[in-house]
């Protein structure tokens, strides 16, 4: 529901504000309310919890989260696309965040059913592209230099290359000589 969309980010912001105002106060929260709409699919719920806990603890200073420790995931164990969907949902980054999570939930439910029936899992929904930071190398920082000539060859074979003589220059057929004379 749309009125619940900001619960995660509101809690994180409130925790940060409380910690800034009263630094010695302890803050705890039961996080299962964040994922109550996804009951029955533990992977989805625990992924949302992992994402929320990571940001609430590291960025806002939440002290205690009431969770089922047996089923907890670490944020580094989440698939990149699942992490992206969870962050979109928890922080309400895009209007389609809930729809994306519902689509992923349907896929995970279908996987559970396929596993019970000993069938192949269904095809994973594509979702939104995951932004992966581009790796940079030393040569990325080199400024381009305009070239007015092609680069010189660097190998010995290329530097000492002698072209083969023109093989067909010895042909003296009258039609060939006639065409050569025109050009």
Image: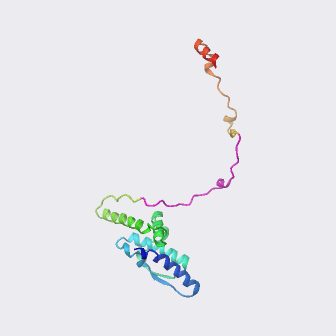
- 143 is within the stretch colored magenta: yes
Q: Position of residue 13 (x, y in %)?
A: 53, 79
Compared across the picture, whether 141 is left or right of 68 comes to right
Q: Quadrant of residue 168?
A: top right
Q: Position of residue 23 (x, y in %)?
A: 58, 86
The residue depicted at 65 percent of the width and 53 percent of the height is 139
| Up/down of 48 relative to 28, above or below | above
Report the magenta residues as a range.
Answer: 126-148
What colour scheme governs how the chains and residues are painted in the rendered image of this protein?
Answer: rainbow
**Foreground of the two, 143 or 111:** 143
Q: Quadrant of the C terminus?
A: top right
**Foreground of the two, 171 or 163:** 171
Q: Quadrant of the N terminus?
A: bottom left
Does the image show residue 68? no
Q: Position of residue 153 (x, y in %)?
A: 68, 38
Compared across the picture, whether 88 is left or right of 151 comes to left
Q: Position of residue 31 (x, y in %)?
A: 44, 79
Does the image show residue 83? yes
């Amino acid at each position: 529901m749309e009125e619940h969309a900001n619960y995660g980010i509101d809690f994180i912001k409130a925790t940060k504000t409380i910690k800034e105002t009263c630094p010695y106060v302890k803050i705890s929260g039961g996080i299962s309310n964040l994922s109550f709409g996804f009951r029955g699919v533990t992977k989805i719920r625990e992924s949302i919890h992992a994402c929320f806990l990571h940001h609430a603890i590291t960025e806002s200073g939440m002290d205690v989260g009431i969770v089922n420790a047996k089923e907890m995931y670490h944020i580094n164990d989440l698939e990149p696309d699942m992490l992206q969907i969870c962050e979109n949902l928890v922080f309400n980054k895009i209007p389609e965040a809930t729809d994306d999570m519902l689509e992923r939930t349907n896929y995970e439910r279908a996987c559970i059913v396929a596993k019970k029936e000993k069938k192949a899992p269904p095809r994973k929904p594509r979702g939104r592209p995951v932004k992966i930071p581009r790796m940079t190398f030393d040569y990325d920082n080199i400024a381009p230099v305009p070239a007015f000539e092609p680069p010189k060859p660097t190998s010995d074979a290329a530097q000492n290359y002698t072209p083969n003589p023109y093989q067909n220059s010895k042909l003296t057929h009258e039609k060939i000589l006639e065409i050569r004379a025109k050009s």
